[in-house]
Image: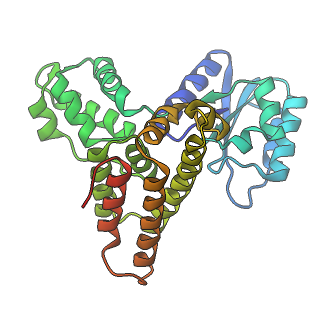
Amino acid sequence: MVSGDEPLLVQESCDLIRDNLKQQGFSEREVFHVEAGFNWEQVLFSANSMSLFAEQKLLEIRMPNGKPGDKGAKVLQGFVENPPEGTTMLLVLPKLEAATQRAKWFKAIESAGLFVQVWPIDVARLPRWISDRFRKAGLTASREAVLALIDRVEGNLLAAVQEIEHLRLVASNNHIDLEQVVDGVANNARYDVFGLIDAAVGQDPQRSAKMVQGLRAESGDLMLITAMLARELRSLVGMARKIGQGQRIDAVLQSNRVWAKRKSIVGRCLKQQNVRALESCLRQLGRIDRQIKGLGQGDPWDELENLVLRLAGRSVH
C-alpha cells in the first residue's frame, strides 16, 4: 500500500515498486480504478485467473477516496488470507484518516504486506529537495535560483520537477542562476486550503497572506476554506482550554491525535495564542460565513486575509 497526498512522491514510490517487481518477473500488470459503482468481482476474477502471457502479474488498484466499501474490504481481506500464487497487489491510496487505518481490511494488509506512508515535503526541507533534484538532472543551481523556483512552484513538486527539466533543456551550461529561473519558470504555485491552514497555524503571516491572495486569484472555494478553518479553530480552542487548565502541551497534542508532522506548528500556535484570541478568530470566521451567504456586509476575502494574519500572530487593526 502506498498512501499520500503528494502526487509526484506517490507516483515515484509506485514506480520504484513496479520496477522492482518487474525485475522479479512480474511482467504483466492490470490496473483498476475504484470509483462509484466499481465492481470488485473484476479484481477477484483477475486474481484467480491464470495469465496467458506471464507466470507472475501485478494487480494495481487505485482508490482515490481510500475507502473500498464492504464488498471491497471483503475482497482485500480475502486476497490477504488466501493470496493467489504468482500475484502481487499494489494499492494506491490518498492520505488515510486514522479511522481508516484502524479498519480490519487495512490491518490485514498491513500485517501481511508493506505500508508506505508518503509525507509531503515541508517548507523547511524544500531547498535541499530542490537542490537534489537539480543535481539529479545534471545541474547545479545558486541558492537564489533554488529559492526563486520554490517561490514559483510552492507546494507543487511535480511542477518543480517539470521546470527543472525545462531549465536543463534550455540552459547554455550546467549552472542555473536566479535570472534563468525568473525568465524561464512559470508561476505554478499551488495555493490550497491545507497549506493555508498550516501557514497560519505555523505563525507565518507573510506566507499566509500570500496563500490567501493565491486562492483568491484562483477563485478558491470560500465555503470549503471556511469549513476547514472552522474545524481547525475548534480543535485549537479545545486544546488551548486544556492547556489553560494546566495540562502540558505535549500531552494535549497526544490526546488530540495531532499528526506527528504537525505537532511542531500546532504547538507553536498554542504557545503564541490563548483561548480568548482563538475564540475571537472563530467568531470572525462566523462573520465571514455570513458575508459569503450575503447576510453580512464586507468582502469575505478581505476578512479572511485579516483572520489568517491574526491567527498567524500579526496584529491587525
Q: How is the image coloured?
A: rainbow
Q: Position of residue 263 (x, y in %)?
A: 52, 33
Residue 85 location, quadrant: top right
Instruction: State the residue at coordinates (46%, 55%).
Output: 276
Q: Position of residue 236 (x, y in %)?
A: 53, 49
Assign the C terminus to one quadrant of the image. bottom left
Left or right, 19 with reference to 114: left
Residue 166 location, quadrant: top left
Identify whether 135 is placed above or below 49. Answer: above
Task: State the count of labels.
Answer: 0
Q: Determine if residue 110 is in view.
A: yes
Identify whether 141 is placed above or below 293. Answer: above
Left or right, 197 with reference to 185: right
Q: Position of residue 159 (x, y in %)?
A: 34, 40
Residue extending furthest toward the front: 245
Q: Determine if residue 3 is in view.
A: no
Front-lying residue, 86 or 290:
290
Instruction: State the residue at coordinates (12%, 31%).
Output: 178
Q: Position of residue 292 (x, y in %)?
A: 42, 76
Front-lying residue, 275 or 234:
275
Instruction: State the residue at coordinates (67%, 56%).
Output: 35
Residue 113 location, quadrant: top right
Assign the N terminus to one quadrant of the image. top right
Instruction: State the residue at coordinates (78%, 54%).
Output: 39
